[in-house]
Image (tube, rainbow, N blue to C red):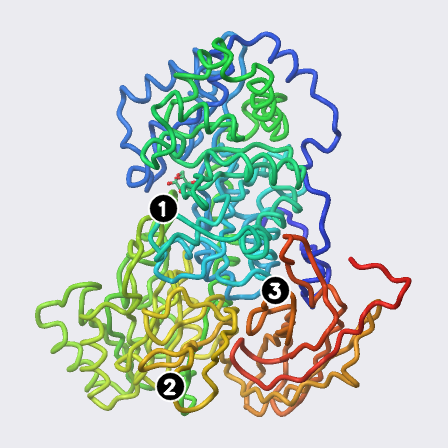
Amino acid sequence: MTGISRRELLGTAMVTSALVNARPVFGMALAAAGGRDPRVEALIAAMTPREKAGQLTLMASAIGGRAATALNPPGTAAGAAAQIAAARAGELTGVFNGEGSGWHRRLQDAAVNSRLGIPMIFAADVIHGFRTIFPVPLAEAASFDPGLAQRTARVAAIEAAAAGIDWTFAPMVDIARDSRWGRGVEGAGEDVLLGRLFAAARVAGFQGRSLTDPDAVAACAKHFAAYGAGEAGLDYNSVDMSERTLREIYFPPFESALGAGAASVMAAFNEISGIPATANHWLLSDVLRGEWGFRGLVVSDYTADEELIAHGFARDGRDAARLAFLAGVDMSMQSGLYLAHLPELVASGAVPVARLDEAVRRVLTLKAAVGLLDDPFRRLGAGRERRLVRRPAHLALALEAARRAIVLLKNDGNLLPLAQGQRVALIGPFAAGAHDLIGPWNVYGDDGEAVDLATGLRAALRDPALLTVAAGSGVEAALPGGIGAAVAAARAADVVVLAIGEAANMSGEAQSRTDVTVPAPQRDLVRAVVATGKPVVIVLTTGRALALDDAVLAAPAILVSWFLGSAAGTAIAETLVGHSAPSGRLPVSFPIESGQEPYHYDHKPTGRPQPPGALQPYKARYRTVPNLARFAFGHGLTYGQMVYGDPDVGGGELGWNHTIDVSVLVTNTGKTDASEVVQVYVHARSASVTQPVRRLIAFRRCRIAPGTSETVHFVLDRKDLGFTGIDGRATVEPGRFDIWIAPSAEAGQPAQIELQPPIASASAP
Ligand code: BGC
């Protein structure tokens, strides 16, 4: 692999909220010098208003990446010619999701031959790999290892940059607490600490050591803000929430991304409490620039400025351009409204020319930062793409990441790992074939270049002749004769591997679901196969947390495989046979039923909590189920057997200016070496703002040999116990806290610690 510093993101294996809460100096590296780039200033002085508006106008590439036709308007020769003409006229700042360095080179030739020769910037949605495809971001978060995400983002950047990409619309750092929303697959799940860590890691990976390096791509933290909180899990839907919740839950991953130097931010499609994010001055200017000091570029989402009309916020295109621009959106994606209206808006005085220059300055500064003003062809060297994509080291990393993303939900009777020598029936719509391997939101990947499960299993079994494969069912429709053939295959086997779940196009953008279950025809298949009495291992392909019904839960073993990318089948097969042990943990809670959504482990208590045990009347529970997860956030088994002791908090007293060492004894009573993620959660017994029933504040991964124990320590201070106060500011209050050191968000018994008040001379944070 091309050199990447394996620098641990936060320099320690123990990851705590205090570390990420330390507010970095925001603002991107490219503006760090503070001074203005004379080349940029000379260009601004020479530009016409139309050329300036052109620098703020980004379009989908007329010739698209492999899957881009599904995402962008299909390309035509006329479209390509028009785009080249726009580049030559200086009316196009760049394109996104374009195909290959050859096409990008043609556009760049046109741009450098425009009146002022300002190079174009090439952007792309590089969400989880470019041609080497890594697990979807949600799956990667299951590794609970931000360092892994940094490494995969680095490789994704190396490959993308080799195809001429300067800028990625990633990472998506939206907290996703409603499994009905399809885009949770693109982020790090429901938890704020994980969200912060993965946001920073991915930015560091994409941007590398220096943005000017030819293998760096500028990152874009998206979608600002609260896009994951759309009402009822419906994509693009409105959000209505308190500023405090925005600041406590939805903003922190953005702050971390910016702290890691993210060069740009994408404004979200949704409205927040009545004001669309794309026209939200408070959000984009007061908070992002004023409070956080962000100096990078803000780009709209795809036609989001024009959508201000449909929102009922702007009168027409001119009004939409004005509102978005004045709110703080520097660059318009795809609507063309800035080019159409900004020159006139400036001429009429509706938009100050200084504001226009400021936005242009941000664009040109970004172009300078990624090296384009020095060499417009920096990432367009012929042959680089062929040489640098899908290198063996990249594919090896894809396999490592895929292995580490797999989560073992249950393993009754230690059915897994499978003993060799058994006849295996591999059944289900995801058993074989070049589909649904790389997952949603991939523009350049190819399922045909990924390993399917049947191929993976044939390679992992000592005797591949012992494997039979049957589809059994389609994903959302039954297959004629499918169940009969599957049952026959199961009967003839010693063990069944059932590969079921969601297709790639069932999550991702605009793929909200009301019922987050395995589709009904597949549940029929599971029922029939389980009824054969053969032991069944379920391998669950999914881009979201699913509500697993009794049919699926009847299987003794369940592995969540998400969408694992290029090495999907190899990683799953190696895990099934025990060449690799599962070590992932759920970054999202799997609910009991869909109707619990939005379900997240860190929900608030109510005045009437349902106590453990039988459902009681007039308590916060549903008629038939408690409001708990089926498989909680943080849950994931190993092939070892972990037993936790009670948390040891010493005397339990934490002085205001002191630290406290809390620990737990973890014993591996199993027969296999295992990797455990020990998690620390807290709950403030009483606070000036009610606090979640639990909140993850730290975790540590450790390897424990069979038959041995390890005492796992965490050193905490008062910042780990902080929260966002009613005034929106970081607050720490003395008082009593429950603390769990546990294998998941709903396991274990709490100990108590007491944070002492500051002594008279000490000051609050
Ligand atoms: C998505 C963005 C994406 C953009 C460009 C939009 O539909 O919301 O996340 O970056 O398209 O492809």
Residue 346: give x, y in percent of width and height.
Answer: 50, 13
User: In the picture, residue 708 is in which quadrant?
Assistant: bottom right
Near-viewer residue (327 or 551): 327
In this view of the protein, can residue 436 be seen by the observer?
Answer: yes
Q: Along the polypeptide, which appears first: circle 3 or circle 2?
A: 2
Q: Disc 2 designates what residue?
A: 617
Q: Disc 3 designates what residue?
A: 689
The secondary element bearing badge 1 is classed as loop
What's under tag 1, amino acid-wise?
Tyr
What's under tag 3, amino acid-wise?
Val
Ligand 1 image-quadrant field: top left
Residue 261: give x, y in percent of width and height.
Answer: 65, 42
The secondary element bearing badge 3 is classed as loop
In this view of the protein, can residue 581 be seen by the observer?
Answer: no
Near-viewer residue (30 or 122): 30
Identify the mark at residue 171; answer none if there is no mark: none
Crowding at mark 1 (Cα within 10 Å: few <14, some 14-19, many 20+): some
Quick check: 58 above or below 743? above
Residue 37: give x, y in percent of width and height.
Answer: 69, 20
Q: Horizontally, is 348 left or right of 364 in the view?
A: left
